[in-house]
Amino acid sequence: MLSQIRESELQAIRSFHSSQLIRNKYENILENLDSGIILFDSNGVLAFVNVQMAKLLGVPRKSLTGCTLTQLLRHPQLSRFKKRKILRFFRESVFHRKRLHELVDEYGRSWLITMTYGDQMEGDFLISVKDVSDFKRIEQTAYQNDKLAMLGKISASIAHEIRNPLTSIRGFIQLLRPHLVSLGKDEYARIILTEIDRANDIIYEFLNSSKPSAPETKIVSVPSLLKEVVLLTESEALMKGCQINLHTNKTPPAFISVDVKQIKQVILNIIKNALDAIHEHHDENENITGMIDISARDTGKHICIYISDNGGGMDQNTLNHLFNPFFTTKESGTGLGLSVSYSIIRNHGGSIAVDSQVGSGTEFVITFPKVSVSEV
């Protein structure tokens, strides 16, 4: 009888140790997930938080365990931005029964937040947070490529049909121009020819935006490339009361392999947009001097070109659609300039990013693969 009791006790101890090992194993898995995990028990007390979640919140784990939601929102080390997001998340979860949430943090990263609760959780609330920025970028790239493909089909089907009659109209206007001059109406001919040329330029932009020509690359010096672009834009900048600063001391003697004509087109387009933004902002704030700063940085494997201005900046909605074909905030714009620029840079194996806030100006960052000195 005594031996049976001892055997039963030993089995209970073994079972306890086994369950403890399994629990420790699963806790270790949760600790090392790349997603943030946090668990509130049925009483609303924070019972578990993994390392990743503590990093995301920017608060030590020891000070989190045992907190209620109210205490968490009052935590002195939790930023105001995160407090607002947490409060909004819980309101939507409780009042609207929303279990999936997407948000963009103060650094522009995208996060997917999931709340799990119900009978399967025995009254507990499990919250997981995952960084989905890479997925969003892939999704945006696919969406952009679909739009450009659609634009290509439209452009190819109508470009020639429009260009042919425009060529005929231009020819007849030039034949009629001497007669208009004799009537003192030469201005009419000039305006007609200018508008025909503008229409042809728009068609050219359509064709380029749908399928930019393959880059004919050659190795060029970054400082030399930027100096040439600045020389091309200085006169227009002066006319608009703006100053372009090329920070040659910050520009490394580095090399990139690019189609010079195409990359000049990209940089000139960004500078032109900056001049327009500054001019518009200057009209509202006459005391502001327009400034465009251009520099480059060598990161080791890449060369980053920075173009920043002190214009009016852009809101989040504009930033979300900035590289979409036909999207423009200008009355006379086609909405194709930045779309074309995006395609050109992607064809060169590079990337383009934008940082802007309303009232604080805009900064474009263009990144290209660096060419080693041995390849020059």
Image (cartoon, rainbow, N blue to C red):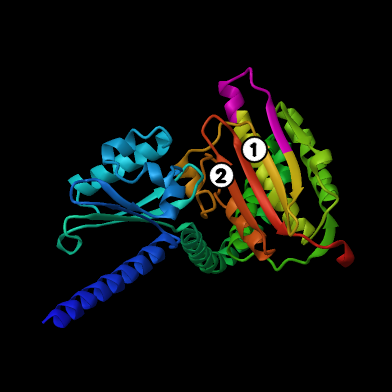
Give the tally of numbered discs.
2
| Dot label at residue 21 | none
Q: Position of residue 24 (x, y in %)?
A: 36, 66
Mark found first going from the N terminus, 2 or 1: 1
Examine the rendering and report whether any part of residue 175 can be seen.
no
User: Mark 2 — residue?
Assistant: 333
Answer with the quarter of the image where residue 62 lies: top left
User: Mark 1 — residue?
Assistant: 274
Task: Please give the name of the residue rendered at 27% of the width and 75% of the height, measured from the top-left corner.
Answer: 14
Q: Position of residue 363 (x, y in %)?
A: 63, 41
Q: Position of residue 214 (x, y in %)?
A: 70, 68
Disc 2 to disc 1, C-alpha distance: 14 Å
Residue 286 in the magenta stretch? The answer is yes
Q: Which residue is nearer to you in this view: 220 or 367?
A: 367
| Side (left or right) of 154 relative to 298 | left
Q: Which residue is nearer to you in this view: 75 or 247?
A: 75
Q: Residue furthest left?
A: 1
| Side (left or right) of 339 relative to 291 | left
Q: Amino acid at mark 2?
A: Gly
Q: Secondary structure at mark 2?
A: loop
Q: Secondary structure at mark 1?
A: helix
| Side (left or right) of 288 relative to 335 | right
Image quarter where the N terminus lies is: bottom left
Q: Is residue 232 above or below residue 169?
A: above
**Magenta part of the chain:** 280-293
Q: Residue furthest top?
A: 287
